[in-house]
Amino acid sequence: MKPAEGWKSKAAAIKCIDSGLRSFIERHGWPTSVDKSNQSRDVAEQYAFIERQVNDWSRDDIDVKAAFDATVKQKKKSTLKGA
């Protein structure tokens, strides 16, 4: 689902994959045992939690982090003049 030039931000990537994640969760439930605590929430609460959960995964899970690093454009850091 990644655009050829990559996503402009992690938030844009998450919005793009949101419907696919919802479908996956509907069919299979939350993907890891750590996330099974989310099953006590009602469906609306679970879906509201998806964006936060994916953000957590993008920092804490090496595979998810690598996927975001490979597909989200990195902002160029400006250098300080005179430094």
Image (tube, helix red, strand yellow):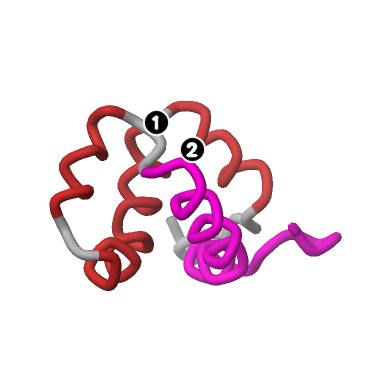
Q: For residue 61, which numbered disc appears in the image?
A: 1
Q: Quadrant of residue 29?
A: top left
Horizontal relation, residue 46 to residue 68: left or right: left
| Res 39 seen here | yes
Residue in the image at 60% along x and 58% along y: 20
Q: Are marks 2 and 1 in contact (CB under 8 Å)?
A: yes
Residue 22: x %, y % from top left: 49, 60
Q: Quadrant of residue 16?
A: bottom right
Q: For residue 23, which numbered disc appears in the image?
A: none
| Res 78 seen here | no
From the image, tell me which residue sits under label 2. 65
Which secondary structure dominates the residues rendered in magenta?
helix
Q: Nearer the viewer, residue 41 or 3?
A: 41
Q: Residues within 10 Å of mark 2 (few under 14, many from 20)?
A: some
Q: Quadrant of residue 17?
A: bottom right
Looking at the rendering, the stretch of residues picked out in magenta corresponds to: 1-29
The type of residue carrying mark 2 is Lys
